Amino acid sequence: MTKHLVFSGPMGNHVWRTSLNEEAWKPALVAAGVIPEPETKEERYAAAREHGMHAARRTV
C-alpha cells in the first residue's frame, strides 16, 4: 500500500528538500542520537543517507 506525505511551508507553499533537511530533519536526527551534532556553526551535519529523507521516502 502506498502512502503519500505532503510537506508544506508555514504559508502553505512548497518546502525545499534542502531546507527541510537542514532546518528540521537533521536537527531531529541529532536530538534522537542518530547523528552527531556539528562541533561548530560552520560545520555541516553528518551525512545520513540511510536515515535521511531519501530513506524516508522509500519506506512510506
Image (cartoon, rainbow, N blue to C red):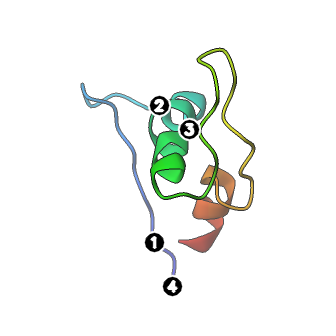
Element assignment for label 1 = loop
Please give the residue where the numbered disc 1 appears in the rendered image.
3
- Of all residues, the one furthest to the top in this rendering is 42
Estimate the x, y position of residue 12 in percent, counting from the top left: 27, 31
Q: Which residue type does callout 3 highlight?
A: Asn
Element assignment for label 3 = helix
- Camera-nearest label, 2 or 4: 2
Please give the residue where the numbered disc 3 appears in the rendered image.
21
- Of all residues, the one furthest to the bottom in this rendering is 1
Q: CA distance from mark 4 to mark 3?
A: 26 Å
Q: CA distance from mark 3 to mark 2?
A: 6 Å
Horizontal side of 22 relative to 9 (left or right) equals: right
Tell which of 57 and 29 is nearer to you.
29
Estimate the x, y position of residue 35 in percent, counting from the top left: 64, 51
Residue appearing at x 61%, y 51% in the figure: 53
Tags 1 and 4 touching, CB below 8 Å: yes
Horizontal side of 18 relative to 14 (left or right) equals: right
- Camera-nearest label, 3 or 1: 3
Residue appearing at x 63%, y 32% in the figure: 38
Tell which of 45 and 8 is nearer to you.
45
Tags 3 and 2 touching, CB below 8 Å: yes
Q: Which residue type does callout 4 highlight?
A: Met
Estimate the x, y position of residue 22 in percent, counting from the top left: 55, 32
Please give the residue where the numbered disc 2 appears in the rendered image.
23
